[in-house]
Structures are given as structure tokens and as C-alpha cells.
Image (cartoon, rainbow, N blue to C red):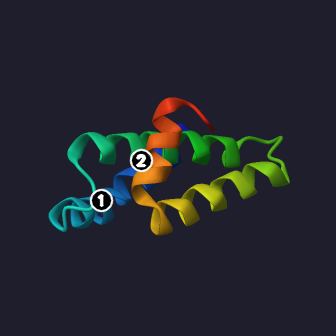
Amino acid sequence: MADKIRILIEGMQGEMLGLLKRKIFEKKEIKEVLSMREKLEYSLAKKTCKVKDFLKCIQFEYDLVHFPNKILNDFLIGKT
């Protein structure tokens, strides 16, 4: 399971580099996004995955697209 998630996260790095080049996020913020995505992917990969896990993942991605600074501040402060 860990290998699949690691490969998935590594595949997201290209997307994150694009966001870095466009100066949407800084390097530290990109690390936080990848870390949060990894955490969410683990929650989706476990056998006892629930609907709330999917909803949390969807909400994170939605907020990341629409409110990039707000979502990072919320997750960095710990309002997950």
C-alpha cells in the first residue's frame, strides 16, 4: 500500500512544480500540500475507508483550487 501511495505522490510533483513556477505556492507550501495529500491517500487506501474520508479528500482538493492560501493556513494551523 505504501509503495502505491508513494508512486502516486511522486506523480503529483509535476503538477506542484507548475504551481511553483506560476508562484501560486512556495516550496514549503508545496511540501505541506503533498504531505496532506499523502495523509488523505492513506485514509482512502485503508480497508475501513468511509464516506467521510472521500468527502474530506474532495473538500481539500476543492478548497486547494478555489482558496489556496486559506486552505493551507487552515491545515497548517490544524483545523483539519
Q: Position of residue 5 (x, y in %)?
A: 51, 47
Alpha carbons under labels 1 and 2: distance apart: 9 Å
> Residue at the left extreme?
21
Q: Residues within 10 Å of mark 2 (few under 14, many from 20)?
A: many
Q: Nearer the viewer, residue 36 or 67?
A: 67
Location of residue 18 with respect to 37 vertically, above or below? below
Is residue 4 visible in this depiction of the protein? yes
Residue position for label 2: 33
Q: Quadrant of the C terminus?
A: top right
Q: How many marks?
A: 2
- Report the amino acid beneath label 1: Met
Residue position for label 1: 16
Please give the name of the residue rendered at 80% of the width and 50% of the height, measured from the top-left corner.
52
Dot 1 and dot 2 residues touching (CB under 8 Å) = yes
Q: Quadrant of the N terminus?
A: top right
Q: Nearer the viewer, residue 49 or 70?
A: 70
Q: Position of residue 24 (x, y in %)?
A: 27, 62
